[in-house]
Image (cartoon, rainbow, N blue to C red):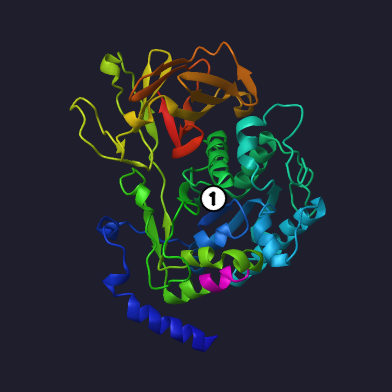
Amino acid sequence: MRKRGLVFFLLFLLLSGCSSVQKPGLGRWRSMPSLEPFKKGQRVLILAPHPDDEAIACAGVIQQALRAGAKVKIVYLTNGDHNELGFIVYEKRITMRQGEFIYMGLTRRKESIKAMKFLGLSDDDLVFLGYPDYGTFEIFSRYWQVKKPFRDRLTRISNVPYKDNPSYGAPYYGESILKDLVNQILDFKPDKIFVSHPADVNVDHKSLYLFLQVALSDLEGLFAAPQVYPYLVHCVGWPKPRHYHPELELYPPDKFINSKINWQRLNLSFSELDKKYQAILFYKSQTQSSAFYLFSFARENELFGDYPVLELNLQPTLKDKIISYLGASEMFKEAEYPPDLREIEVMEEKGSVSYARQDDYLIVRVDKPKRLSSRFGALLYIFGYSKNKAFAQMPKIRIITSAGRCKVFNAKNRIIDHGVVLDFGMDYLILRIPFKLLGKPDYILTSLKAYHGNLPIDVVGFRKIKIK
């Protein structure tokens, strides 16, 4: 082990100063600020959608926090029991029976426990909630105040099946997950929270971020608001190159270069980096099929960043169908627009997403490439939060546009008399949505996915927008 460590250390020294291994055009990330150092007595909470996310995204955080004398706790949303391909490679047999999925989840739990003990944590620092892998976003968007809980399509399970988990037997409802998360946060009272990113393409990753936003809103005023640091794991084609490259830095994906995300980095020493690599090796059920991917996160630094919270201002008119820009996603870049528009960002193909308020309506405008014409469609999620109403009672709106028409759903139910007005033009799509439909929220969590026919072409990460 010492000989291998020495070899990696020499390789690290040799390549760390070579500019040829760095991707061109990343000069702007050189000035990326560093994460504030951890302090003795701080309480650091890491929220992991699946076992292994805490290691590949936050192994450095764990080591530095513990060394500084901070208290670290990890809460796992799921046991990761839905990675069938990885488990088939690991077990060398097809696993499709209910009991085998549970065995898969127990296996991944054991791997996380071993990896985290290696990094310095104990059993008491780890909490496994055990909610359905690959099902939590559907629960967040559809399963509140309904008669039957979410039922996993493969496992055919509708409540937490792990007897050692504190949530054992909890039905797959949004209320169950929110309650457990609120209890964990209230019990630990963290100063810092590390959580999966709202622009992550994995559904469990984005849903954990959404549940956290609601939980923190419910707990507002009960203790000092913690700092939140989202980490990115799943983004198409990132990070590159694959495999273990301790000589390289971890930069944000290209699609985020012109985003408003406030990225920060945590630099790792060679010993911290090597220990992170060794911790990842404990996840044998995953590394046997995806080592090339997991090891690509073991680099000189870890990466964290969130979008700023937006605020909607009142816009009196929609003159020339122009809407004041108030936020866009990672896939947009700056372009020239009329001078009366503020902070315009657009897609590479001259598309953009804008939000505004007009009277009692939320306005969502999508400027699209003309070549997409009538085959352009969008799926818009809007989840509202109000201090005056329990989140379970708030509408969970989903709007689907296609061929110049729109369908509106609240959770699982379609709404016929919705009051949404769609204006579909050659190079734009405008939705006029009554705030009454959204439950008159204090803020919304919203995301949009664009389609060309049935083919997804882009997605906007979830944004938090305050309603004045």
Q: Quadrant of the C terminus?
A: top left
Dominant secondary structure of the magenta stretch? helix
- Graded by Cα atoms within 10 Å as few (under 14), some (14 to 19) or many (20 or more), the crowding at tag 1 reads many
| Residue 279 part of the magenta-drawn span | yes
User: What kind of element bears circle 1?
Assistant: loop
Q: Which residue is drawn at 33% across and 18% down?
A: 314
Q: Would residue 94 be visible to someone looking at this image?
A: yes
Instruction: Name the residue tied to disc 1.
Output: 190
In the rendered structure, the answer to whether residue 263 lies left or right of residue 200 reads left
Amino acid type at image mark 1: Pro
Residue 237: give x, y in percent of width and height.
44, 55
Q: Where is residue 424 in the image (x, y as percent from the top left)?
A: 39, 19
Which residue is at a point 32% across and 49% down the rendered structure image? 257
In which quarter of the view is residue 15 placed? bottom left
Q: Give the range drawn in magenta.
A: 276-282
Q: In which quarter of the image is the N terminus?
A: bottom right
Q: In this rendering, is residue 409 above or below 157?
A: above
Judging depth in this view, the residue of 62 and 347 nearest the camera is: 347
Residue in front for this viewpoint, 107 or 309: 107
> Is 304 rendered above or below residue 19?
above
Q: Which residue is rendered at x = 67% and y = 43% of the image?
A: 180
Q: Residue pushed farthest left?
A: 339
Give the quadrant of residue 95.
Answer: bottom right
For residue 15: magenta?
no
Q: Where is residue 224 in the image (x, y as percent from the top left)?
A: 49, 43
Q: Can residue 35 be seen in this view?
A: no
